[in-house]
Image: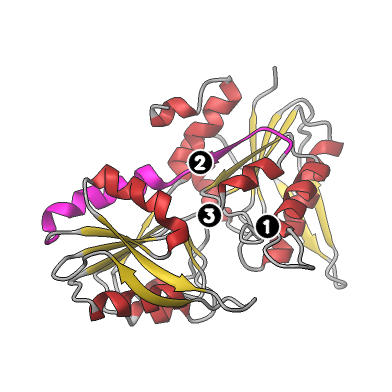
Amino acid sequence: MYGSIKIFSGSSFPAFAARVAAELQIPLGGIDLIEFPNENLFVKLHHSVRGQDVYVIQTTSRPVHRNLMELLIMLQTMRLDSAGRITAVVPYLCYARSDKKDQPRVPITARLVTDMIEVAGADRYITFDLHAGQIQGFFSIPGDVLTAFHMLSDYLMGKLPKMHNPVVVTADLGFAKKGRNFAEKLGLPIAFIEKRRTGNDAKAHAVTVIGDVAGRDVILVDDEVDTGGSMAQAVQILKANGARDVYMSFVHPIFSGTAAQRLAALPIKEVVTTDTVPIPPEKQAAFGGRLKVLSVAPLLAKVIRRAHEGRSVGALFNE
């Protein structure tokens, strides 16, 4: 139905886009991204994409608004150049935590972001591990919400022989269902950290652990880590309840501010995450070799190939 695959990258994580293109054995599309003195952005393609199957790769981590606006302008550029089909590939979707009206006089910003992506010209979308499943319903266009669960759980499975009586612990009750998936896949019991958020800021306070962690190695799981405050409190509570070694696993390493240094200072054995978000070298170095970053680029390349050829994506996960 469409021409050949064309991969374009914004400025948020070009190294990741290059890895995806390399997996597909195609070159990245040429593009000029210019910021004028007034901070307005300008995009120009080096070659026509008329009738082609275009994939725009842009994660929307920090700087969030620059990266989001860049994505929208790139999508519209592809649309105005008569691309055959345009897929917005957003490994990490910004504003995903603003997914409902949980108090009066507040927005649902996740819905606004999905609307903008559609209006800008996307025909489809691909993303990883949304904070809440209902965000899929905010899109009116088809797409694929991929997960790093299989990759992370397979890696952790290889660690089990070295662990002592391990248990999976979720960083909060909101992650309980996905935590159970980890526990079932690894064949382990599960426990939960209870935390409470009292205001509109990013702070939540871990209160207690529900379940048995005494004398056990712990696999602490969550979807993303922003400031690292909740994870730090979780580790402290786990240790206070007699936990042994703590392994930390999450998909999106946002690492705002001094989060990397905060986590690195904790008594943890290893941190396992992915490359949906770029981690600056100095933040990686803070962990002193205890950080393992698994790349989702090969998986994404397989999904792009299947989408282009009209084959099932779910078959990759035996679904």
Q: Nearer the viewer, residue 136 or 257?
A: 136
**Which label's residue is closer to the chain start, 3 or 2?**
3
Q: From which residue to which does the magenta span run?
A: 140-164
> Is mark 1 in CB contact (under 8 Å) with mark 2?
no
Q: Which mark is residue 100?
A: 1
Q: Nearer the viewer, residue 281 or 101?
A: 101
Q: Position of residue 98 (x, y in %)?
A: 66, 61
Q: Position of residue 239 (x, y in %)?
A: 24, 78
| Residue highlighted by disc 3 | 15
| Residue highlighted by disc 2 | 146
Q: What residue lies at 70% left-to-right and 44% top-to-bottom? A: 138
Residue 127 is left or right of residue 189, and the answer is right
Q: Nearer the viewer, residue 22 or 244?
A: 244
Split into 4 quadrants, where in the image is the N terminus?
A: top right
Q: Position of residue 293 (x, y in %)?
A: 38, 58
**Which label's residue is closer to the chain start, 3 or 1?**
3
Q: Nearer the viewer, residue 79 or 251?
A: 251
**Which label's residue is closer to the chain start, 1 or 2?**
1
Q: Is residue 50 above or below residue 194?
A: above
Amino acid at the residue labelled 3: Ala
Task: Choose mark 1 or mark 2, whichever is in front.
Answer: 1
> Is mark 3 in CB contact (under 8 Å) with mark 2?
no
The secondary structure type at the circle numbered 2 is strand
Task: Choose mark 3 or mark 2, whichever is in front.
Answer: 2
Amino acid at the residue labelled 1: Lys
- Is residue 29 something that shows in the picture? no
